[in-house]
Amino acid sequence: MVKPVDSPCVGVCVIDARTDTCYGCFRTPREIGGWPRASEEERRAILVKLKARRREAGLPDLPKDDEVGEG
């Protein structure tokens, strides 16, 4: 059985106007709003995007990124 995908929210909920992503989790407002209704497959796809966004920003991977495919 596949483990359900947890929300990537870290409680720092501020949208960067330059990138239109959250400073804390790197999701866009659309991704944040759609998370509760997203399928597990859609959630995993979002996590792959977040991993790539963090790397593009020069930030290290998170420990949970081991569970996420490459982006």
Image (cartoon, rainbow, N blue to C red):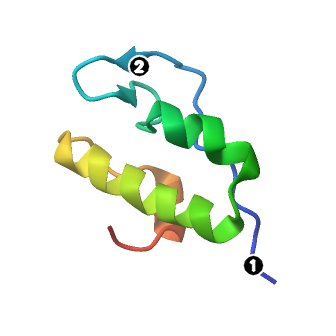
Kind of residue sitting beneath label 2: Ile
Q: Which residue is located at x 68 percent, y 56 percent?
A: 38
Name which quarter of the figure residue 9 lies in. top right
- Across and down, in percent, residue 26 comes to 40, 37
Seen from the viewer's position, the closer of residues 41 and 3 is: 41
Above or below for 67 versus 58: below
Dot 2: element? strand
For the N terminus, the image quarter is bottom right
Q: Which of the numbered marks, if any, corresponds to residue 15?
A: 2
19 sits to left or right of 21: left
Seen from the viewer's position, the closer of residues 66 and 53 is: 53
Above or below for 13 versus 37: above
20 sits to left or right of 33: left
What residue would you read off at disc 1? 2
5 sits to left or right of 45: right
Name which quarter of the figure residue 43 lies in. bottom right
Instruction: Please tell me whether mark 1 or mark 2 is closer to you in this view.
Output: 2
34 sits to left or right of 66: right
Does residue 7 appear in this view? Answer: no
Q: Which residue is located at x 51 percent, y 38 percent?
A: 30
Q: Which residue is located at x 44 percent, y 36 percent?
A: 28
Dot 1: element? loop
As drawn, which residue projects farthest toward the bottom? 1
Distance CA(mark 1)–CA(mark 2): 31 Å
Kind of residue sitting beneath label 1: Val
Does residue 59 appear in this view? Answer: yes
Labels 1 and 2 touching (C-beta < 8 A): no
- Across and down, in percent, residue 68 comes to 49, 68
